[in-house]
Image (tube, rainbow, N blue to C red):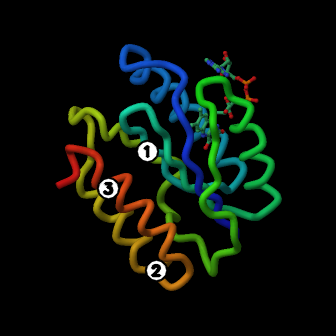
Amino acid sequence: MHLIVYFSDYTGDETTIAKDLEHIKTMSQSNNKEEGITGVLFYQNGNFMQFLEGEEADIRKKFAKISQDSRHTNIRVLFDEPIEKRYLKDSRMDTFNLSKNETIDYAKLERIKSIYTHNLQIKSNTLIQAFKTFLEESTLFL
Ligand code: FAD
């Protein structure tokens, strides 16, 4: 199993994010199921943070595709390493807009945070720190 985590900058604005996120989520959930990819996508204040898990070849192919998407730019890879197992086996690509509070499933968000905090702490404190900072910067995640 392999994990890629990256940050990027959204090229749209607050008037377009809801539609774009919904579109990305729909595409991802159907594509990722076929390709055995799991993960989660966060959006907050103009930035994306995405976790992509799967077989290395599948993840690299997917990441190459995503990297060409004009809905974001300035992609910074934070983590690109083998992992022992798939951590988000139930998430084909859960999507959270942390900038607004209408549709947040807090229970699910807590569960994802907890899974990664527990399992990846040994592997990469940097990743966990960045993840926590990203979530804590959201005014919703108190
Ligand atoms: P494409 O030929 O790329 O496009 C299919 C449809 O999407 C078309 O109707 C087209 O109009 C529309 N589309 C494509 N690009 C854009 C664009 N820039 N603006 C508006 N509409 C567009 N895809 C996944 O499968 N899994 C993921 O986990 C995933 N995560 C993503 C994370 C982010 C932050 C972003 C920005 C995109 C993500 N995507 C993901 C979408 C991915 O980049 C591709 O658009 C998608 O995989 C469809 O690819 P395709 O080759 O099947 O179709």
The x and y percentages for residue 18 are 39, 23
Q: Which residue is mark 1?
A: 42
Left or right: 6 as drawn, with respect to 41: right
- Callout 1 amino acid: Phe
N-terminal label among 1 and 2: 1
Q: Is residue 70 above or below residue 34?
A: above
- Callout 2 amino acid: Gln
The x and y percentages for residue 75 are 64, 42
Q: Residue at x 65, y 59 (%)?
A: 4
What is the crowding at mark 1: few (fewer than 14 residues within 10 Å), some, or many (at least 20)? many
Q: Which residue is mark 2?
A: 121
| Viewer-nearest residue: 14 or 83 | 14
Q: CA distance from mark 2 to mark 3?
A: 18 Å
Left or right: 118 as drawn, with respect to 91: left
Q: Which residue is mark 3?
A: 109
Q: Is residue 57 above or below residue 98?
A: below
Q: CA distance from mark 1 to mark 2?
A: 20 Å
N-terminal label among 1 and 3: 1
| Viewer-nearest residue: 33 or 7 | 7
The x and y percentages for residue 69 are 68, 29
- The answer to whether the beta carbon of the residue marked 3 is less than 8 Å from any atom of ligand 1 is no
- Callout 3 amino acid: Leu
Q: Secondary structure at mark 1?
A: strand
Left or right: 114 as drawn, with respect to 50: left
Q: Which residue is outermost to the bottom?
A: 122
Q: Quadrant of ligand 1?
A: top right
Q: Secondary structure at mark 2?
A: loop
Q: CA distance from mark 1 to mark 3?
A: 10 Å
Q: Is residue 35 above or below residue 101?
A: below
Q: Kindly indicate whether the residue at mark 3 contacts the one at mark 2 (C-beta within 8 angstroms).
A: no
